Amino acid sequence: YGTVEVKILNIKDLQILNKENIDNYIDCDKISNALCLRNRVSGDEITLRKRNVTKSLKKLFNEDGVPLSERNKLAVLSDGESVVWVQNYGTSKNFCIDKDSKNIMKIEILN
């Protein structure tokens, strides 16, 4: 994947959030299990904030023309039950930050 950088922010840091990278922020209080960074697996689905529709990663990658050779190279962050975040796509709507978010994690893949 490259180097994964994770930063934990608190509510005081909300003013500095960059709107362009908002899809890389996760509300930690919405996570129920330990996080695992992995490749995609059969059945993975995500609801992206901008698209507001749940799709399998397979269908999402097909629609976006992601080559088969690249699909398993994309990082998937999961809490064991749900996909939380996908590299190049962002955070699942179910884990996005909002005005009530208190504990925030920023995830980024550095090449």
Image: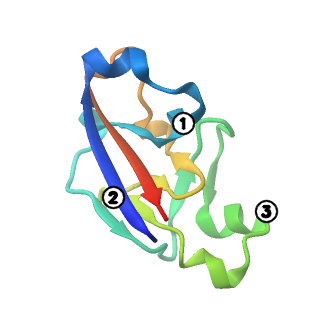
43 on left or right of 12? right
| Camera-side mark, 3 or 2 | 3
Quarter of the rendering containing residue 94? top left
Which residue: 41% across, 28% down? 97
Q: Which mark is residue 81?
A: 2
**Please, what secondary structure does the residue beneath circle 1 have?**
helix
Identity, as a three-letter code, of the amino acid under mark 3? Glu
Which residue: 54% across, 53% down? 46
Quarter of the rendering containing residue 98? top left
Q: Which mark is residue 6?
A: none
Q: Indicate which disc, 3 or 2, sits on the residue closer to the N terminus.
A: 3
Residue 88 or 36: which is nearer the viewer?
Answer: 88
Q: Which residue is identified by label 3?
A: 63
| Camera-side mark, 2 or 1 | 1
Q: Is residue 12 above or below residue 76?
A: above
Residue 94 or 19: which is nearer the viewer?
Answer: 19
Identity, as a three-letter code, of the amino acid under mark 2? Glu
| Camera-side mark, 3 or 1 | 1
From mark 2 to mark 1, how far is it between C-alphas?
A: 25 Å
The answer to the question of whether label 3 and label 2 lie on touching residues, with beta carbons closer than 8 A, is: no
Residue 71 pos. (x, y %): 61, 75
From mark 3 to mark 1, how far is it between C-alphas?
A: 22 Å
The answer to the question of whether label 2 and label 1 lie on touching residues, with beta carbons closer than 8 A, is: no
Q: Which residue is identified by label 1?
A: 21
